[in-house]
Image (tube, helix red, strand yellow):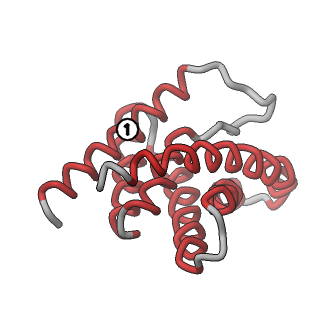
Amino acid sequence: MTARRAAHCAMLTALAMIFGYVEALIPFGFGIPGIKLGLANLVIVLALYLLPVYQAAAIQVMRIALTSFLFGSLSMMLYSLAGGMLSLLVMGLMRKTKGFSIVGVSIAGGVSHNLGQLTVAVLVVQNLKVAFYFPALITAGLVTGGLIGMVAYRVKPVLDQMEL
């Protein structure tokens, strides 16, 4: 990895952390606990299209670890890693097939992120009734993933010109 690429990865990690922090400051409630817009995921979606997948994964892991240590807890890290890594895996596979738009990839990422977090919740509380929350999480993942994907669709051409 070149110094330039390392600097880009560090910048994207910091940007994702800032987006996550700003999102935490915005009173944005759907009336359902745990549902967020996922502004930090905008950076990850764009990283999947601009960088090799392993670098997008490094950005995702660093963002989650640093944000959890600075602003959260170990349990937050557990849930975020489960959702974030499943999301990254699904988005990376969809991106590789080249049959999906950036919006479709982002939607799949939003839904799979929620699925990963819900899976951890079921394991932690050891109660399958938590899974009844999944329809609300699917809906939230579709909506927020779509919104993030539409923004990514508009921002990507600008970043392509910057030759990351």
Q: Position of residue 20 (x, y in %)?
A: 48, 35
Name the residue at 50% across, 44% down.
155
- Specify the quadrant of the image occupied by residue 38: top right
Q: Nearer the viewer, residue 30 or 133?
A: 30
Q: Please give left or right for residue 137 compared with residue 76 in the image.
A: right
Q: Is residue 14 above or below residue 31?
A: below
- In the image, residue 77 above or below residue 104: above
The residue located at (59%, 20%) in the rendering is: 26
Look at the picture and state if 89 lies above or below 67. below
As helix, strand or loop, the secondary structure at mark 1 comes to helix
Q: Amino acid at mark 1?
A: Leu
Q: Going by the picture, which residue comes out furthest to the front?
A: 161
- Rendered-image quadrant of the N terminus: bottom left
In this image, 162 relative to 80: left or right? left
Q: Which residue is mark 1?
A: 15
Rendered location of residue 77, percent (x, y): 47, 48
Say which residue appears at 49% left-offset and 25% top-offset.
22
